[in-house]
Amino acid sequence: MEFFKNKVAVVTGGSEGIGRAIVLALLRQGCKVATCARNYDKLYALKSSNPDEHSLFIYAADVSNEMDCAHFFEKTIQQFGTIHILVNNAGISMRGLFLETNLDTFRKLMEVNFWGNLYCAKLALPYIIKNKGSLVGISSIAGFRGLPGRSGYSASKFAINGWMEALRTELMETGVNVLTVCPGFTASNIRNAALTEDGKPQGSSPLEEQELMTADECAEYIVEAIEKHKRTLILTGTGKRTVILNRFFPTLTDKLTRKYYFKNGRLVK
């Protein structure tokens, strides 16, 4: 707990799922945490569940909106004075074949998953560099292996992986740790909220959520990786196997991925 005690962490998308679990894990470690999300009611419920009201700051913001991000970070600095850790967690997914999905859906994915990360990092990094802190990006296995039915999501996560790698090299002599986290399938609301071909939330998950890694377990791995200054964190056995297979046996991985996601020529997962 000494590593995190009295440090200030910013977590985007902290109202539910992995983001909420990260917020709670950091609070348990003694961090002061600022978090944002679009849904204020869920943020307020999070705030109400935290016994120390002075250690958690909440703010309703959409990370795809640059001014929302600017206001959130301005209020965070007013509240806590500095930033040691930024966890860029906010993100959305999709489910739909490329030819059947409208372009606005792809734009929305990039605005949230890519530009939202850039806006927040631009605002936080001056403080993080001063404190020799940590920049954390929650990417995905889809940032290593393109997934059918998630082409826009995969594109946004490939972009995050490349951007984080470039930043890591740029910041190498500053003392800042840049950590890219790639969870495998994790039980969360992201698939329920995933955008369909027409840009509307699908409202249900095609996967067996009860069989997936929990958000709390995922958050514990992430917090440990921050403390240990890890470079990359790839989670779940399936995720690790996918990355290794795709690197060394890409054609086989194409076939296995197709078999997993399609049945009788139809996208089923």
Image: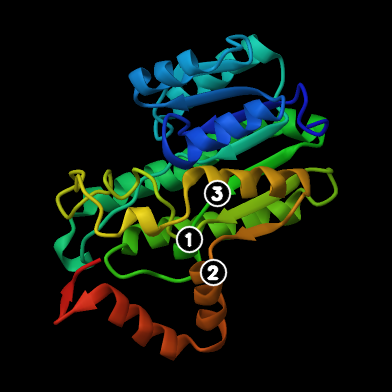
Task: Tell me which amino acid carries mark 1.
Answer: Gly
User: Could you say where residue 81 lies in the image, as x and y percent from the top left?
Assistant: 71, 14
How far across and how far down the image is residue 66, in percent? 45, 29
Q: Secondary structure at mark 2?
A: helix
Vertical arrangement, residue 255 with respect to residue 123, above or below: below
> What residue sits 75% from the left and 47% below the top?
177
Instruction: Specify whether 110 is left or right of 88.
Output: left
Of mark 2 and mark 3, the one earlier in the sequence is 3
Q: Are marks 2 and 1 in contact (CB under 8 Å)?
A: yes
Q: Residue furthest front?
A: 210
- Is 182 or 144 nearer to us in this picture? 182
Which label number is shown at residue 184?
1
Q: Quadrant of the N terminus?
A: top right
Q: Which quadrant of the figure contains the C terminus?
A: bottom left
Residue type, label 3: Cys
- Horizontal side of residue 202 vs 5, given as left or right: left
**Does residue 73 show up?**
yes
In the rendering, at what x and y percent does residue 41 appear? Answer: 34, 18
